[in-house]
Image (tube, rainbow, N blue to C red):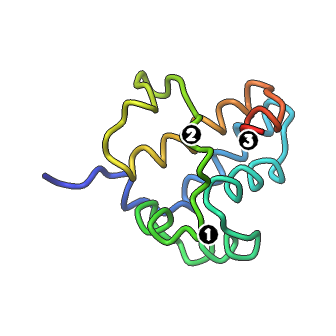
Amino acid sequence: MAKHKIYTMSVASVYPHYVTKAEKKGRTKTEVDEIFRWLTGYSQEELEAQLEKQTDFETFFAEAPQLNASRTLIKGMICGVRVEDIEEPTMQEIRYLDKLIDELAKGKAMEKILRK
């Protein structure tokens, strides 16, 4: 079976859309970056390097320094699918990220988004 197209897309190609979505709702790029860092364990410098290298989503998550253990607390629907029910690990990580950005755009407090 062929890989899903999102796996081979660069994170950098989607990143501006995450930022735009957040900024349209009065949130900031800094908050988007905080979500990325919280989820993956990348430092700000490492995150920027991954974006600059045009790293694809599959590699981005495979090379993540420390996926946050609390990410399993992320529940709910994204693209009509419950994130907690997604069986393919890489797709689940991508959807966790999508869900966190959605929560940011919906005005949730960062403490709740980051499951503190």
Nearer-the-camera pick, 62 or 71: 71
Residue beneath disc 3? 114
Residue beneath disc 1? 51
Q: Nearer the viewer, mark 2 or mark 1?
A: 2
Q: Are marks 2 and 3 in contact (CB under 8 Å)?
A: no
> In 3D space, how far apart are the residues under numbered discs 2 and 1 (Cα atoms)?
17 Å
Identity of the amino acid at label 3?
Leu
Which secondary structure lies at badge 2? helix
Q: Which image quarter: residue 11?
A: bottom right
For this view, does 81 lie left or right of residue 75?
Answer: left
Q: Is residue 12 above or below residue 45?
A: above
Q: Is residue 43 above or below residue 21?
A: below
User: Residue 53, how many percent across, how many down?
Assistant: 56, 78
Residue visible at 59% across and 71% down?
Answer: 65
Of labels 2 and 3, earlier in sequence is: 2
Identity of the amino acid at label 2?
Asp
Can you say which quadrant of the picture contains the C terminus? Answer: top right
For this view, does 30 lie left or right of residue 48?
Answer: right
Residue visible at 65% across and 31% down?
Answer: 102
User: Residue 39, how many percent across, how many down?
Assistant: 63, 53
> In 3D space, how far apart are the residues under numbered discs 2 and 3 (Cα atoms)?
13 Å
Of labels 2 and 1, earlier in sequence is: 1
> In 3D space, how far apart are the residues under numbered discs 3 and 1 (Cα atoms)?
22 Å
Q: Nearer the viewer, mark 3 or mark 1?
A: 3
Residue beneath disc 2? 98
Q: Which image quarter: residue 104?
A: top right
Few, some or many C-alpha atoms within 10 Å of disc 3 (few <14, some 14-19, many ≥20)? Answer: some
User: Residue 24, how many percent across, how many down?
Assistant: 78, 33
